[in-house]
Amino acid sequence: MIVFLAGQKLPGDPGRAILGPLAQESGVRQLDHKLGVDRPLLTQYDAWVTNLLHGDLGTSYEYNRPIAPMIRTALANSLKLALVAFLMCVPLSILAGVVAALSYGNWPDRTISVIGLSALGLPEFVSGVFLILIFGIWLNVLPLDATPPPGAGPGTQVYHLIMPAIPITLVLFGYIMRMARAGTIAVLDADYTRTAVLKGLPRRTVILRHVLPNALLPTITVVATQVGYMVGGLVLVEYLFHYQGIGALTYNAATNKDFPMLEAAVLVIGIIYLVCTLVADIAYTLLNPRLRLAAD
Amino acid sequence: MSATAAPIEPSGAVDAGSASTLRREVWRELRHSRSFLIGMTIVLVWTVCAVAGYHIGPYTPFEQNLNAVNTAPSGSHWFGTDQVGRDVFSRVIAGARSVMLVAFAATLLGTILGTVLGLITGYLRGWVDESLSRLIDALLALPVVVTAVLVVAALGPSSITVALCIGVIFAPLIARTVRTAVIQERELDYITAARLRDERGSYIMFSELLPNVMPPIMVEFTVRLGYAIFTVASLSFLGLGIQLPTPDWGLDISQNISVVSAGYWWEVLFAAAAIASLVIGINLVADAIEKAME
């Protein structure tokens, strides 16, 4: 939370930022007073924390409107985008990772690994540009605008979100696929897998019952920790596709020195990150009998 | 007698020159690695562009020809021209400089800071280690791009801010790797011997430990360089890095993406392809080095 104190301490005069460089000094000072930013830092911090505990995120300097509803709308938009990305990415990358591991060293493994490595390194806006050119311009099959027309049904909304979701999917694909592959390879080597094979169980049963549940344990943790990383990707993707999500909100607040908005947005991102890490830990414990016993 | 003496001699020699033997072995492995050769070729081509790019293009990257704006690729403009009639090919070649320079500076800074931090935390342990590790955890609580957006927006956009910011964010990540290597290394006999000789801590850290933890640092450096290019390009795309009219891939893409819907695809495609090839090249090299070190 001390991080937010740093946010308040950042150089840059909000009054000046709102009124522009040509405004008179007296006007700037008057606005600073109205916003309360000329008060001592501790008083400001105290007021901020007190309001926060009452569920009040404050008022945006830039829009002169309460922040909470704006954050809520942006968050809902980002969650839709993230959900589309996740639904495309997680099953696909786990499948790819397992297929790669099962054909370890052969061509499917090598092809998937090369794709994963390239996907991992490409910045979201670069793959976004390729997608815009290929699907938006040349093939003209996907809409360029991520925001659907007002009143659009869920189907249309998803249709508009497919293209922005793919760049996020690609980066996550690299990570999750690698983990799934490494996990599966390790489990395939384990004694209990050999036992299952030697018992004469069909390959299908061995893979579904013995290999997958154990191989995917570390993958779950990666999926959850990647959510935090994904927010970074959202900043870029929402900027590229002009989508009003939490990433775009943070970026605008930062460039416009809208400190209350910036602090609220970063706070929300931090909380999401923490919750995801916690969920990952809980899921991991529930799925791993060894940890469950140790806790008892 | 000479037959029995022979096996003893090499074992002594290996001890003295183990670092250079390792380097030679890694090098031999790398020379036969296809991904290393491909990656290195890509990186070298872009390095040449970064050094001489302003002079080897057919036009200068700033030259505007208002009689030829938004022209499609042709014989006189291989990659076409942009909205103010600048030659895209020349700008793509010259654009290698800013991203590579900033990414390299950021990675170097991060590696030096991280190595010093890792040596100190790994060697001293105790409360120094504890408090530094907490600080590192706090720094890593936010996604890199978000932290960078905050810092750069506060301090104002510039290449130096971007390099400093990425370097400082990378330092704890590199420190973690170095610390793990140091903790394994500090239990070995030569460190105990140095301590019994009553050497100073700084001498042990930088003259005894450092040369022996160099391999993981080298791997970390190449891996981080890939990430640095990723982040630098992303930040300049957001307009937070280098400013116009300097040719820069990320910046040029964000400047020209709005006219793509009018069909001027060449104004963004080649810069995007340039970033993609550089990132893939460095990742291929990093991957090969990592494999060879094992």
Image (spheres, coloured by chain):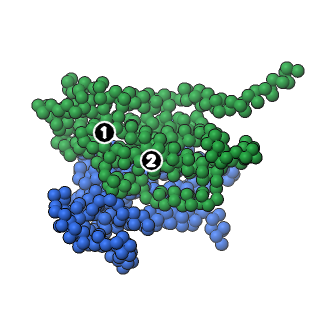
Chain colours: A blue, B green
In this rendering, the answer to whether B34 lies above or below A207 is: above
Q: Give the residue number, with chain letter if any, for mark 1.
A: B249
Q: CA distance from mark 2 to mark 1?
A: 21 Å
The residue lying at 34 percent from left, 72 percent from top is A40
Q: Give the residue number, with chain letter if any, for mark 2.
A: B167
Q: Quadrant of residue A235?
A: bottom left
* Callout 1 crowding tier (Cα within 10 Å): few <14, some 14–19, many ≥20: many
Q: Nearer the viewer, residue B34 or B210?
A: B210
The residue lying at 65 percent from left, 72 percent from top is A296
Q: Where does residue B46 sit, x and y in percent of width and height?
A: 38, 31
The residue lying at 61 percent from left, 42 percent from top is B206
Q: Quadrant of residue A292?
A: bottom right
Secondary structure of the residue carrying numbered label 1: helix
Q: Nearer the viewer, residue A34 or A236?
A: A34
Q: Quadrant of the C terminus of chain B?
A: top right
In this rendering, the answer to whether A33 lies above or below B200 is: below
Q: Where does residue B20 sit, x and y in percent of width and height?
A: 64, 29
- Farthest-out residue, bottom: A54
- Pointer 2 or 1: first along the chain: 2
Q: Chain of mark 1?
A: B
Left or right: residue A115 versus residue B86 is: right
Left or right: residue A140 versus residue B125 is: left
Q: Where does residue A213 sit, x and y in percent of width and height?
A: 57, 57
Residues flagged by tags 2 and 1 on a common chain? yes
Kindly identify the amino acid type of the residue bearing the numbered disc 1. Trp
Please identify, in this view, whether the residue under mark 2 or under mark 1 is nearer the observer: 2
Q: Chain of mark 2?
A: B
